[in-house]
Amino acid sequence: MVFDRAINLDTKNAEAFSDKSIVLKALGRYDAARSMVDRALSIDPGNILAWIRKGTLLESQSRYEEALASFDQALSLDPYCICSSTIHAWVNKGDTLAVLNRDEEALAVYDQAMIFDPKHASLWQGKGFVLGELDRQKESLAAFDHALTLEPKHTSLWLDKGIALGKLRRHKEALAAFDHALILDKNAYTWKNKGIALCKLRRYKEALTAFDQALTLESKDADIWNDKGRVLLKLRRYEEALTAFDYTLSLDPKKISTLRWKIIAFWKLGRYEDAITQAEQSIFNRSGKLPHIKS
């Protein structure tokens, strides 16, 4: 490995140790990667990029508070964002706070970072996400739209825009955003969200096709199987819906919503005893009542 040669030539080469951590992280060897970045920092404790890399490694291991400390250390070394790498510390700090549901703090971080780099699309994307979490949907959509002016071919931005439009009940526009995302990258999550938008528009056959497309890419995703079952119920294909719910539960036995939909499938099939048995075995909603079943 080229990094090993560089290290052998110069055991005080902090950059080589830091760069090697990237490869180890990509291989899923997080502890070894962190050991490399720690070695880099022992040589050069003022290495901003190494602190950022340490933070992202810790974040990958769900060690969020430690990750925040690493990002803060990077920011303390360059408080005015003179180094081009420092903006990534701001982005990652905001994203980590969002993961911790500290949305107001995350929003403040993104806004602060935009003082230094107002054209960084990831900052606008992060801002859009936390605004959505704070139920400020119109502002969330505006942030995603602004991010797309900066990076119009960013697939996840089109996906985020579609989700924001869905929350605003603008489902036709959401569908257009998901279609745009699929032109750029046909991934399962986008197909799933397209299916949801089509359901909202009562285009159930097309929704089923979208969920099937998602399952060709992620065949073990319980949420998509659950969505497929629900749209099959809408299409009155109750046996197939029941099969989908059974498979969902084989993937996630504790998925309460699926247990409830399975009761409905039994009821629609006239299998009332099975519906009652399933209800007795299920975890009910807070009211302790069966879901309302339309005749």
Image (cartoon, helix red, strand yellow):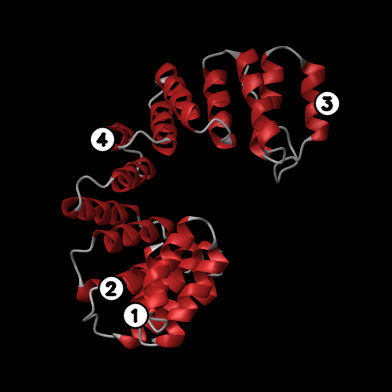
Please give the residue where the numbered disc 1 appears in the rendered image. 48
Label 2 residue SS: loop
Rendered location of residue 14, percent (x, y): 38, 80
Cα distance between the residues tagged 1 and 4:
37 Å
Label 3 residue SS: helix
Q: Amino acid at mark 2?
A: Ser
Residues tagged 1 and 4 counted as in contact (Cβ below 8 A): no
Pointer 2: residues within 10 angstroms few (<14), some, or many (20+)? some
Residue at image position (43%, 16%) is 205
Please indicate, yes or no, whether residue 230 appears anywhere in the rendered image: yes
Pointer 3: residues within 10 angstroms few (<14), some, or many (20+)? few
Please give the residue where the numbered disc 4 appears in the rendered image. 180
**Relative horizontal placement of residue 125, taking residue 245 as reference (left or right):** left
Residues tagged 2 and 1 counted as in contact (Cβ below 8 A): yes
- Note whether 107 is above or below 175 in the view shown: below
Pointer 4: residues within 10 angstroms few (<14), some, or many (20+)? some
Front-most of residues 80 and 106: 80
First in sequence: mark 3 vs mark 4: 4
Please give the residue where the numbered disc 2 appears in the rendered image. 85
Q: Amino acid at mark 4?
A: His
First in sequence: mark 2 vs mark 1: 1
Q: Nearer the viewer, mark 1 or mark 4?
A: 1
In which quadrant of the rendered image does the N terminus lie?
bottom left
Cα distance between the residues tagged 1 and 3:
60 Å
Please indicate, yes or no, whether residue 52 appears anywhere in the rendered image: no
